[in-house]
Image: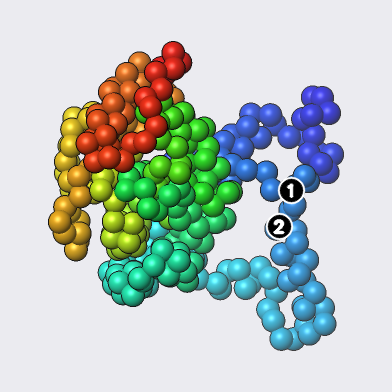
Amino acid sequence: MNRDDQKPDGSDLDAMAALSALSWQVAMGADEAIADLPLDRYAATAAKAAQPAQSAPSQKPPLTERIRSTPPPAPASTSAKVIGAEEAIADARQAAAACTTLDDLRAALEKFEGCPLKKTATNLVFGDGNPEAGVMFIGEAPGADEDRQGLPFVGVSGQMLDRMLSFIGLDRSRFYITNMLYWRPPGNRTPTDAEVATCLPFLERHIQLINPKVIVLVGNRSAKSLLQTSQGITKLRGKWDAVSIGSIDPPIPALPTLHPAYLLRNAAQKRFAWRDALILRERLNELGLATSPLDTGSDAD
Ligand code: URA
């Protein structure tokens, strides 16, 4: 046993147990160090609980008794439904419908308490880029970097998307980008249907306020949800379809494409994403939206 195998209090720590505890924490979404030193919140809570017991011993039963008599908290996934998923969706619809500008919509989301993801997220991730550009990209959900910075697609996969788009002359002054979900799911887990449904009225209003000429659906989840299909992204990608959810009328032309995070894991698929980019470029040209020359830089793949 060496010094690294010891707890801060000097007792031995089994390396495998420490590793599995760490993997469990990462899986639960605690994937970021927020302080230089560990803080034992159990000790802090117990010390706090002990204080009032000393000053007013007759008023509160001992901590152990209180823990025993406290009903267990509802699991996180159902506690969101305590207010009722239906009710949260109705609230979202009402709040979104009242918004007439993007600033209104951002403020409405800042106030909205119906999506449980907000409780675990650091920041609201609303949108980035040029709302007047006529091109709107819609991804799935913010990751850790986006959550930290409050901006969509700023992490590794976002940087890759920007790089690919730069080859067809697009930068964030020439497109607008957002996600289906406005808060990061803990540990980047797949969003639940209830979370998607709760954010959808805001996204619908977001689309109406941006009023894009074309939408690019980035990744499987946003393509399936917004095209209301069970087909997967490998079937959908590269073919023009249209978004017509809710009150979006007339339907808006939409091009599904592969998610950059998927491309980072499957480099061979980049050629399909590049084809999609060229298909997009062609439509933008027809619409008079692409303004800079095609960059055929050799590191496109
Ligand atoms: N993936 C997404 O779908 N959206 C982001 O903002 C970042 C990564």
Give me the residue at 33% from left, 36% from top: 290
Foreground disc of the pair 2, 1: 1
Label of residue 41 in the image: 2
User: Residue 35, which numbered label?
Assistant: 1
Could you tell me which residue is drawn at 39 percent across and 53 percent down? 131
Q: Amino acid at mark 2?
A: Arg
Q: Answer few, some or many: residues within 10 Å of disc 1's Cα (few below 14, many 20 plus, some between 14 and 19).
A: few
Along the polypeptide, which appears first: circle 2 or circle 1? 1
Q: Position of residue 112 (x, y in %)?
A: 43, 69
Q: CA distance from mark 2 to mark 1?
A: 13 Å
Kindly state the secondary structure of the residue where label 1 is placed: loop
Task: Look at the numbered discs 2 and 1 and tell me whether their residues touch, using CB distance below 8 Å.
Answer: no
**Can you give x and y, in whole percent of width and height, for residue 231 in the image?**
17, 37
In x, y percent, where is residue 71? 50, 71
103 on left or right of 43: left
Which residue is at a point 16% across and 52% down the rendered structure image? 251
Looking at the picture, tell me which residue is in the foreground, 54 or 272: 272
Quick check: 129 left or right of 16? left
- Residue 14 in sight in this render: yes
Who's the residue at 68% across and 70% down the image?
63
Q: Amino acid at mark 1?
A: Ala
In the picture, which quadrant includes the C terminus? top left
**Quadrant of res 4:** top right
Residue 44 to residue 58: above or below: above
Callout 2 environment at 10 Å: few (<14), some (14 to 19), or many (20+)? few
Q: Specify the label residue 143 is tagged with.
A: none
Residue 159 x %, y %: 50, 33
Q: Quadrant of residue 54?
A: bottom right
Q: Quadrant of the N terminus?
A: top right
